[in-house]
Image (cartoon, grey):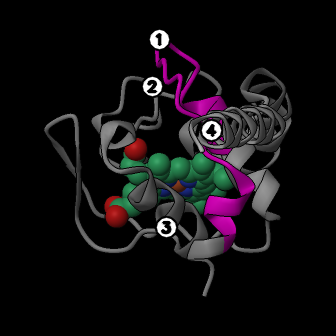
C-alpha cells in the first residue's frame, strides 16, 4: 500500500513537472516579436521611447498602469481606452482606438515588449491564452 502510494506520487510529480516545462512561455522571444508589433501599431502614439506625448498620449515607459493587473492592460489594448485615465499622476482623456484586429499573440507580444522596455521590467509574461480569454 505504502509503495503504491509513493510510486503514485512520483508519477504525479513527473507528469506535473514535464507539463509545466512544456507550458513555459518563451518571454524573451515574445519581447523580440513585440518590438515589431509595437513599431507598427503602437509607436505612432506612444512614441519610439515609450514616453508618449505630454497631455495627449500617455507614456508606457515607467507607466504605473503597467503595474496594474494584467487583465486591465490586455483590455486596454483589445478594447481601446476611453475616458479619463491617470498615468503616473497625470490625467489623460483621449480616445485610444481598439487594437482588436491584432492576433492574440501580437497583443501579448506588444505588451510584453512594453512591459520590458525603457526601464520597465516584468518577469511575468502575458500569454496569448490570456488575451484569448478576454476577447469579446
Ligand atoms: C491612436 C493612438 C494610439 C495607438 C495606436 C495606441 N495607443 Fe495606447 N493609448 C492611447 C491613448 C490616447 C491612451 C489613453 C486613453 C485615455 O485617455 O483614456 C492610451 C493608453 C494606453 C495604455 C494604458 C495607459 C498607459 O499609458 O499605460 C496602454 C497600456 C496602451 N495604451 C498600450 C498600447 C499598445 C500596446 C498599443 C499598440 C498595440 C497602443 N497602446 C496603441 C493612444 C494610442
Label 3 or label 2, whichever lies nearer to me, is 3
User: x, y (%) of residue 70?
Assistant: 44, 50
- Label 2 crowding class (10 Å Cα cut-off): few <14, some 14-19, many 20+? many
Q: Secondary structure at mark 4?
A: helix
Sequence order check, earlier mark of 1 and 2: 2
Evaluate if marks 1 and 3 touch, with contact meaning CB atoms under 8 Å apart: no
> Regarding mark 3 in the picture, which secondary structure is present there?
helix
**Residue 103: image x %, image y %?**
82, 64
Q: Residue furthest front?
A: 1
Q: Is residue 87 left or right of residue 46?
A: left
Say if 32 sits above or below 83 in the image.
above
Instruction: Identify the secondary structure beneath mark 2.
Output: loop
| Residue at x 70%, y 73% (from the top left corner) | 100
**Left or right of 8 on screen, residue 89:** left
Residue depicted at 56% across the width and 37% down the height: 2
Q: Which residue is mark 2?
A: 61
Farthest residue to the top: give it. Answer: 119
**Which residue is label 1 attached to?**
119
Q: How many marks?
A: 4
Q: Which label sits on residue 75?
A: 3
Q: Residues within 10 Å of mark 1 (few under 14, many from 20)?
A: few
Crowding around mark 3 (Cα neighbors within 10 Å: few <14, some 14 to 19, many 20+) is some
Q: For the residues marked 2 and 4, what is the alpha-carbon distance in whole angstroms?
A: 46 Å
Element type at marker 1?
A: loop
| Image vertical order of residue 119 relative to residue 38, above or below | above
Check if mark 4's residue and mark 1's residue have beta carbons within 8 Å: no
- The answer to which image quadrant residue 19 occupies is top right
According to the picture, the residue beneath numbered tag 4 turns out to be 9
Q: Which residues are magenta?
A: 110-132
In which quadrant is the N terminus drawn? top right
Beta carbon at label 3 within 8 Å of ligand 1: no
Amino acid at each position: 500500500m505504502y509503495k503504491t502510494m509513493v510510486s503514485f506520487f512520483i508519477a504525479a510529480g513527473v507528469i506535473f513537472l514535464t507539463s509545466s516545462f512544456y507550458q513555459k512561455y518563451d518571454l524573451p522571444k515574445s519581447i523580440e516579436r513585440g518590438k515589431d508589433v509595437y513599431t507598427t501599431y503602437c509607436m505612432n502614439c506612444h512614441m519610439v521611447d515609450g514616453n508618449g506625448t505630454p497631455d495627449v498620449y500617455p507614456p508606457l515607459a515607467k507607466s504605473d498602469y503597467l503595474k496594474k493587473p494584467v487583465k486591465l492592460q490586455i483590455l486596454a489594448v483589445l478594447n481601446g481606452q476611453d475616458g479619463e485615465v491617470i498615468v503616473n499622476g497625470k490625467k489623460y482623456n483621449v480616445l485610444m482606438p481598439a487594437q482588436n484586429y491584432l492576433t492574440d499573440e501580437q497583443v501579448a507580444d506588444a505588451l510584453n515588449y512594453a512591459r520590458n522596455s525603457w526601464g520597465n521590467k516584468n518577469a511575468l509574461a502575458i500569454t496569448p491564452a490570456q488575451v484569448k480569454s478576454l476577447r469579446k
